[in-house]
Amino acid sequence: MRPLVLKGGRIVTMDRERRVIDADVLVRDGKVEKVGRIGGRADGQTVIDCKGLIVLPGLIQAHIHLCQTLFRGLADDLALEAWLAKRIWPLEAAHTEESVYWSAMLGAAELLLGGTTAILDMETVRHTGAAFEALESIGLRATAGKCLMDAATNPASLREPTERALQESADLCSEWHGAAAGRLRYCFAPRFVPSCTGPLLRAVSDLAERAGAVIHTHAAETPLELQMVKRDTGNDELSYLDSVGISGPRAALAHCVWVDGEGIARLARQKTNVVHCPSSNLKLGSGIAPIPEMLAAGCHVAIGADGAPCNNRLDAFEEMRTAALIQKPRLGPESLPAAQVLELATLGGARALGLEAEIGSIEVGKRADLTVLDLSGPHAQPDEADLISRIVYSARAADVRHVVVDGRVVVKDGVLKTAKIEEIRRAANAQARRLRRAVGF
Ligand SMILES: [Zn+2]
């Protein structure tokens, strides 16, 4: 790949000093080689003019279900349990390899066009290989995993024998963990405690440890879930997850809405990653996660849009703004300020993916995942305003001009370069129609 220069932008580095500097960024072999003044154009360089634009570390969403993108708008205004049982599980069960592929393409296109460069993804129980193929071709950085559901209480259409589920996970891990020159990674993804047996969860912990992979699951999303776990295991959910080895820096727990002071102290002590999904928590009526309390206790927190049917956007800007706003009626307007929210969507996400040494900030030696914003629109003016405030409170996905992942320009001038958006739209619509006919609603 030819060296790439992003010339003349304002760089929000997210480095240790949180420097914002006017500089060029030189990218070679997928990495940031220099941040500073880059002299005259050398032969063979690709130059992108970033004058008047803002260069951010690529945004990271640490909880996404690409397999659900085709379900957007098919499961609105329901509580989590009905949302899952009546809509999401039947739709997931109706997926084919082709529909998983186009669901991933549609979701990944939306993410890239909106400035998200890396995700932690949970697929469904079948056809996870097809999602990886989509991710490989479209150029998003992703850590994805097959969803694990082996408990007797699961719908028969998705339940799998424990051994078979684990074997397929291990096979997918050997095939995809580190693929596309390290851009793709595997995660072990038990759906949530009520969907999984104890032996499966313990085995997942061992497999992830051995493979150096992340464990991606949901936790403490609703009071009903907590009651179910208490009834089945006699334990509160976070202690139970810890007892089966799902805690610590290797674990990413989506939601954690219903966590008390003791739970927060445990998450902080063990450095377990919490993935905050504010829009999803609001739309499903799950509640407001105590994120400021978690951050004050030293918890590691990332952010994510969750799946398209519970959001219904996969827009990192929307999640940042909502994350900040929903805390303010509860704890006052000073809580969760913009600068802290931007950390969740960059450094926090990198940590949840286990990639804090590689992404999350614009620094020499890190992978070149970059999002270039045009904040000249009236909604993000005047320029005089605080830049971080404009990014978190004013910017939207449509302000994304260019996106680079692993040194490759995947979005240029607001246009996806790695796939044809018309083709994605056509195929995704055909697959969504087929799914809807298959489930009969
Ligand atoms: Zn989820």
Image (cartoon, rainbow, N blue to C red):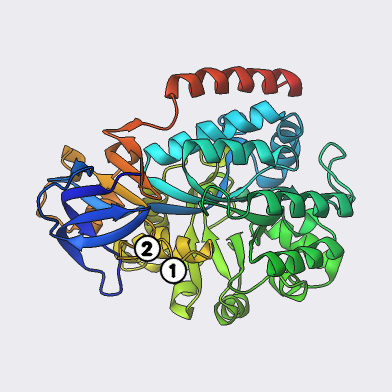
Mark 1, residue position: 357
| Earlier sequence position, callout 2 versus callout 1 | 1
Say whether residue 109 is left or right of residue 383: right
User: x, y percentage for residue 260?
Assistant: 60, 74
Question: Distance between the Cα atoms at labels 2 and 1?
Answer: 7 Å
Q: Which residue is rendered at x = 55% and y = 65% of the image? A: 274
- Secondary element under disc 2, as helix, strand or loop, is loop
- For the N terminus, give its image quadrant: top left
Say whether residue 164 is left or right of residue 240: right
Q: Tell me if label 2 and label 1 are in contact, CB under 8 Å.
A: yes
Q: Is the residue 1 above or below the residue 386 in the image?
A: above
Residue 74 occupies quadrant: top right
Some atom of ligand 1 lies within 8 Å of the CB belonging to the residue at label 2: no
Q: Which dot marks residue 318?
A: none
Q: Is the residue 267 above or below the residue 106 in the image?
A: below
User: x, y percentage for residue 128?
Assistant: 68, 41
Q: Is residue 112 visible?
A: yes
Residue 20 occupies quadrant: bottom left
Q: Residue furthest front?
A: 43
- For the C terminus, give its image quadrant: top right
Q: Which residue is rendered at x = 70% and y = 54% of the image? A: 174
Mark 2, residue position: 366
Q: Residues within 10 Å of mark 1 (few under 14, many from 20)?
A: few
Tell me the amino acid under the disc marked 2.
Lys
Q: Which residue is rendered at x = 63% and y = 21% of the image? A: 431
Task: Give whichever of 384, 79 is nearer the camera.
Answer: 384
